[in-house]
Image (spheres, helix red, strand yellow):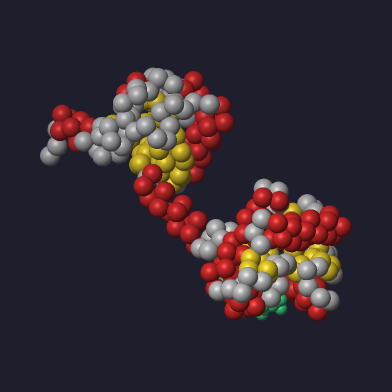
Amino acid sequence: MLDAEMMTAVLAALPDPAFLISRSGKYVAIYGGQDVRYYHDGTSLIGQYISDLVKPEKANWFIATIERALDSKELLIEEYELSNKDVKGLSDEGPVEPIWFEGRIKALDFKIDEEGVVLWVASNISQRHELETRLRQQSDTDQLTGLFNRRRLERELSYHFNAFKRHGYAVSILMFDLDHLKLLNDSCGHHAGDQAICKIAQICQESLRQTDITCRFGGDEFVIVLPHLNLDQANTTAERLRVAVEQAFLHNHQLHTQENIPVNISISIGVTEVSNQDDSYEQALKRADKALYQAKRGGRNRVVSA
Ligand SMILES: Nc1nc2c(ncn2[C@@H]2O[C@H](COP(=O)(O)OP(=O)(O)OP(=O)(O)O)[C@@H](O)[C@H]2O)c(=O)[nH]1
């Protein structure tokens, strides 16, 4: 059997720090987590209160989580970010960058100083978190342009469609397509076609608001979701974008065929606003697609709304 001394040694050897924290947020004890590559020494925290050590917003979250663990008696698993700069009184020795933690929090069935206590094991998951973030970004991003891809667009449309239904704020959609890209590819080469696609992506990013969501839908088709813009405002935005593309290629990025004939690049845009009659975002997207088709049929380099 293990004696008390052995138990103390076992607890001290725990790879991840394990805190005992009371309902009021007092650090009662800490065990393990002594590898400075992963953790800061937390012994200076003992006897102190979370609310005195971290900013109010974060402290409130810690206290609420402790209360939830105590009241539910369930094992809670929570991810959170913390830097030693966020916690008063921690030494500088240890990781420099903020750490992503996975906290495993469980109520203990005894009290200390008449207060419920939880065991809070904080594991450093920064590497895993960074990998997850990178993978999520990659799976949401179009490789050529760096814009969001169709998969991410569907998520955004779904989110804003539901928000429209619930909160009633306007949501508009632009769908646009390069004019005569095939001709450009054939006369100037595929690389010039790629360059034109990238330049247009850049123009979108420069001329739209940060809250607008620009996506490469596929090939030479793009979709932009404009939260909080009604049809009139979306038409104005579309026209501004059309002109910006036309002007950019006319003045700064004029492309030429191998015979040195200038090639004018333009886009055709379909615009629509999500309406109460729409049962799904797909209906609105189809409307924008039809308007785009009309813009092409009407002679290209124009905006049509539906
Ligand atoms: N360079 C390049 N070309 C692409 C890419 N994706 C699609 N295309 C080409 O873009 C052309 C798109 O064809 P369409 O949209 O039907 O026709 P278009 O020539 O653009 O003519 P309109 O859209 O009718 O004005 C096809 O020839 C595709 O091969 C890409 O990533 N790079």
Residue 91: x %, y % from top left: 34, 22
Q: Can residue 148 be seen by looking at this rendering?
A: no
Residue 36: x %, y % from top left: 27, 32
Q: Where on the image, by quarter, is ligand 1?
A: bottom right
205, 102: nearer the viewer: 205
- Does residue 241 appear to the left or right of 92 in the view shown? right
Q: Residue 85: name its quadrant.
A: top left
Q: How many marks?
A: 0
Q: Residue 239: name its quadrant.
A: bottom right
Residue 155: x %, y % from top left: 62, 62
- Residue situated furthest right in the rendering: 232
37, 21: nearer the viewer: 37
In the picture, which quadrant includes the N terminus?
Answer: top left
- Does residue 207 appear to the left or right of 135 in the view shown? right
- Does residue 303 appear to the left or right of 94 in the view shown? right
In the picture, which quadrant includes the C terminus?
Answer: bottom right
- Give the residue drawn at x 55%, y 74%: 189
192, 262: nearer the viewer: 262
- Residue situated furthest front in the rendering: 259
- Give the residue drawn at x 50%, y 56%: 137
Give above or below for 196 relative to 258: above
- Give the residue drawn at x 36%, y 47%: 127
Give above or below for 64 relative to 305: above
- Give the residue drawn at x 15%, y 29%: 5
Q: Residue 38: name its quadrant.
A: top left
Q: Can residue 203 be seen by looking at this rendering?
A: yes
38, 50: nearer the viewer: 38
Residue 294: x %, y % from top left: 81, 76
